[in-house]
Amino acid sequence: MKEPIIIKDISKSNGDILRIEVSEYKGVSYLNLRMWYTDKDGELRPTKKGVAVTKEDYELLKAAILDAESKF
């Protein structure tokens, strides 16, 4: 399994981080958008809050984001 590629970490006001990364699971690549928190030892840990999308779903997600951009 390849190491995840961190695209961007976005800090949230509560100290959590929204991490956007490309990762692989069972030979399939995913775009992961997941909340991370800092544990009591100072280590970043992923939460269950998030979504992982395949390349095919990424194309649909990208189109939806571009559509939403015009409505902001």
Image (spheres, rainbow, N blue to C red):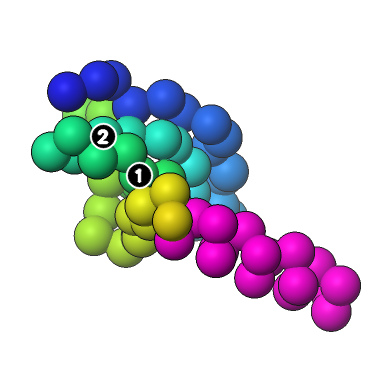
Q: Which mark is residue 30?
A: 1
In the foreground, 10 or 64: 64
Q: Which image quadrant: the C terminus?
A: bottom right
The reply to whether discs 1 and 2 touch (Cβ–Cβ < 8 Å) is yes
Give coordinates of residue 30: x percent, y percent.
Answer: 35, 44
Asked if residue 66 is among those painted magenta in the image, a careful observer would answer yes
Q: Which mark is residue 47?
A: none
The magenta segment is 57-72
Q: Earlier in the sequence, mark 1 or mark 2?
A: 2
Label 1 Cα crowd, 10 Å radius (few <14 / some 14-19 / many 20+)? many
Q: Which residue lies furthest to the front in this view?
A: 56
Q: Name the residue under label 2.
A: 24
Residue type at numbered disc 1: Tyr
Quarter-wise, where is residue 47 in the image?
Answer: bottom left
Cα distance between the residues tagged 1 and 2: 6 Å
Q: Is residue 41 visible?
A: yes
Q: Is mark 1 on a helix, strand or loop?
A: strand
The residue at the point 33 percent across, 27 percent down is 4
Asked if residue 53 is among those painted magenta in the image, a careful observer would answer no
Q: What element carries label 2?
A: strand
